Structures are given as C-alpha cells and as structure tokens.
Amino acid sequence: MFKYEAPANLLKDKVILVTGAGSGLGRAASLAYAKAGATVVLLGSNTGKLETVYDEIENAGGAEPAITPLNLETASEEHYQELVDGIATAFGRLDGLLNNAGYMGSLMPFQTMSMAHWQKIMQINLNAGFFLTRFTFQLLLQAENASVIFTSSSAGKKAHAYNSAYSVAKHGVEALMQVLFLELENTSTIRVNTINPGPCATALRRSAFPAEDPGTVAKPEDLMAAYLYLMGKDSIGKNGKQFSAQD
C-alpha cells in the first residue's frame, strides 16, 4: 500500500469537491478528507446516498459538508455553472477537486457495444472530469495551493480486452492530466495528478467482475493514504504524475 501517514488537521479549513461521493472511493475520500479537517462538497447523482455520507461526516464531528446532486451523464453547461456559483457563494474558493465518479458497466466485445453505452462511459469517466476542472478553474486559482486529482485505473496504462470504452476513457484521463499539467506548470499554483486505486471492493468493480469475492481485494478505506497525500500540503511540488494507491 501507499506509505503515508496524514498529520492531524492536514486539510483544516480547506474546501474540497468530491465527485461520486455517495459510495465507494468517493465516499471513503469524503470521510477521510472531512476527518482531516476539510469542508467537503459532496457531488453525486443519488441524493439519498449523499445525505447518508453527510450524516456520517457530521456524526464523526467533521465540518458541515455541502450536498450538490448532479447527474454527470446528463449535466449541461448551465448545471456546471450553477455548481460553481453555489461554491463561490458559499465558500469563495475551492482548494481541491477529486474527479472520482466512474462507470464501467459489464464487460463485452467492442462489436456488441451500443453507442449509448460507449457515450455514457465517456461522459462520466472522461468528459465530466474535463468539464468540472474547466468550470472550477477560476475558483481553484483563488486557493493558495490547489490540488486536482483524477481517479484513473490500470486500464489507463494498458488496454483491457472486452473493456474498450472504459480503457479508452481512462487513457483519456491520463492524457488530460498531462495536458493540464503542461498548461498550468508555469502559470498557477494548481497541481494535477492521477491515482490508480487498483482492484478494490466497489460497485463499479462488481459490475465488471460479479463473480469476484470482494474480500479478496482492498476496501476503499484502505486506499486513502494516497488520496490524502495528494490533496494535502505534503504533495506540493508533485505535479503531472501517476500514483498507485496500492504500491
């Protein structure tokens, strides 16, 4: 596992937006960031799940989070602008963005994949990360040291058969991170990196590997060292890099 022990209050007074916050890695990251002192903006398509995470944070004594329901598959420019306007009004800045929301679906040969399935995977895994980073950019610039993290995958480094859309989307995530790094390297305090969480017990993985015993892979909570490191001050200077949560 990634070796890092987050100091107490690592993210005190930070405002961090987490997508896919209602379950899996997004839920685990939201709880970890809140425990480290951050005010977390919880974004997801299922309001009930977001409310559950909200309650978990409050019951643990964390700063009051914010809930932003948004379906990334169908979100328009107006929806993204409303999200940014809401964060600006409530907090005035954004210190971190975790582009984590993902969708894989079942494995299938490329020749049987529908256009709708391909487009849904691209929209949620790749396009939404670009749009969120693009629309929150001015808020991120107002932070002293902002961090943008993309949850990637081993499929973003090596293509996986019968997983064509997801592999292409995650390769795109890695390319997007590199482009953002090159454009922002000498112009701002925003750093951008990717994390490959590796196999972990999430609904996304179960959709692709329904016969897998979830007890044989890591739990999302076990992978938070990398997510805390890249969001906190100890990773300042780490930019344009690919990290693995299980190495």
Image: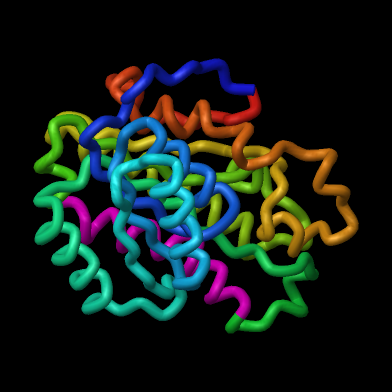
Q: Is residue 104 magenta?
A: no
Number of disc labels: 0
Name the quarter where the C terminus is drawn: top right
Please determine whether, in this image, residue 233 is positioned above or below residue 39: above
Main SS of the magenta segment? helix
Left or right: where does residue 185 sit relative to residue 55?
left
The x and y percentages for residue 208 are 76, 61
The image quarter containing residue 69 is bottom left
Residue 15 seen from this side: yes
Q: Nearer the viewer, residue 22 or 144?
A: 22
The image quarter containing residue 190 is top left
Q: Is residue 120 magenta?
A: yes
The x and y percentages for residue 56 are 48, 50
The image quarter containing residue 89 is bottom left
Residue at x 72% of width, y 37% of height: 218
Please determine whether, in this image, residue 2 is positioned above or below residue 89: above
Residue 240 seen from this side: no
Please determine whether, in this image, residue 22 is positioned above or below residue 106: above
Residue at x 79% of width, y 69% of height: 108
Q: Nearer the viewer, residue 170 or 128?
A: 128
Residue at x 30% of width, y 30% of height: 11
Segment tinted magenta in the rendering: 117-137
The x and y percentages for residue 139 are 14, 50
Q: Colour scheme used in the picture? A: rainbow
Please determine whether, in this image, residue 188 is positioned above or below residue 203: above
The x and y percentages for residue 100 are 47, 52
Residue at x 53% of width, y 76% of height: 119
Name the quarter where the N terminus is drawn: top right
